[in-house]
Amino acid sequence: MMKQSLTAARNRAHKGEMEGVSTAAETIARARHGRKPLAPLAEAQRPADEAAAYAVQDALHAALAPAFGAIVGRKIGCTTPVMQRYLRIDHPCAGGVFAATVHASGAVLPYRDFVHVGVECEIAVRLKRDIAGAADIPAAIGGYMAAIELVDDRYVDWRKIDTPTLIADDFFGAGCILGPEIAASEAGDISQAIGRTIVNGVEVGRGRATDVMGHPHNALAWLAEHAAARGRALRAGEFVLTGSFVEVRWLAPGDSTTVSVSGLGSVAVTLTP
């Protein structure tokens, strides 16, 4: 009798957790679809920890896929001291990138498609084979791209949003602009790259690839281990945004941004009024 009671209690707890995951994902998805600033989730919906946050993120991806397509890339946030200080989070966080939110350099996007859009200067890595763990990384990299990550401050006040909720909501992720791909064999030592963010012709930020956890490959190794632990290995054909060299820059309607990464070229986007 005692065993049956414990089993029933566990089943009820699991059901409650799954309902909480579903409800949180639905709330975040409604905000994303409606481009409405998200307030802190109700206590019953809020992910209790980062494991729960990634479960909500998975449910959110499924909910948003009909509108935004499949997840074709991954993003890593908080990989540099400048972004960790800015967000007051001391460890990397992962998110997904939907097919419909990936654009080529020179894209012109409506500002109204975002709540408060920002840009980050990054190196993107294209995978030519699956990665099951950190040891697979060097042989799995097919090429590198200069990239702008598009981020969206889609919160009433992001400083009042807990870290698990930010993770559940793809950690500000709103897409990216990818530059031409440079083959890994031709890219040289990307750890020596310098990145610059230029808004309306004025340089507003500069950083080094070594700021990204010592080397962008280290960020990729973190993601590979994180994804493998969750049974979501990185796949051939996917790309990974490895983290911003410089602090995010929030844009106004009409702003144009260029990101340049030495050795990888430049990439540009304009946000129309």
Image (tube, grey):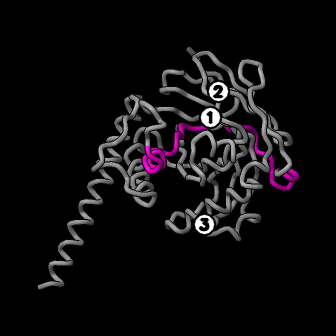
Label 2: few (<14), some (14–19) or many (≥20) C-alpha neighbours in 10 Å? some
User: Picture quarter containing residue 19?
Assistant: bottom left
Callout 2: SS = strand
The relative height of residue 199 versus residue 266 in the rendered view (above or below) is above
The type of residue carrying mark 1 is His
The type of residue carrying mark 3 is Glu
The reply to whether the C-beta atoms of the residues labelled 2 and 3 are less than 8 Å apart is no
Q: Out of 36 and 40, give the one closest to the viewer.
A: 40
The type of residue carrying mark 2 is Ala
Label 3: few (<14), some (14–19) or many (≥20) C-alpha neighbours in 10 Å? some
Magenta-tinted stretch: 162-190
Across and down, in percent, residue 127 comes to: 68, 57
Say which residue appears at 42% left-offset and 57% top-offset.
49
Say which residue appears at 60% left-offset and 61% top-offset.
234
Q: Residue 225 carries which label?
A: 3
Q: Residue 164 carries which label?
A: none
Say whether disc 2 or disc 3 marks the residue closer to the N-terminus.
2
The reply to whether the C-beta atoms of the residues labelled 2 and 1 are less than 8 Å apart is yes
Q: Residue 107 carries which label?
A: 2
Across and down, in percent, residue 186 comes to: 87, 51
Is 188 in the magenta?
Answer: yes
Say whether disc 3 or disc 1 marks the residue closer to the N-terminus.
1
Q: Which residue lies furthest to the left in this view?
A: 1
**In this image, 207 relative to 64: left or right?**
right
Q: How far apart are marks 2 and 3 (CA)?
A: 33 Å
Q: Name the residue under label 1.
A: 103
Label 1: few (<14), some (14–19) or many (≥20) C-alpha neighbours in 10 Å? some
Across and down, in percent, residue 131 comes to: 64, 65
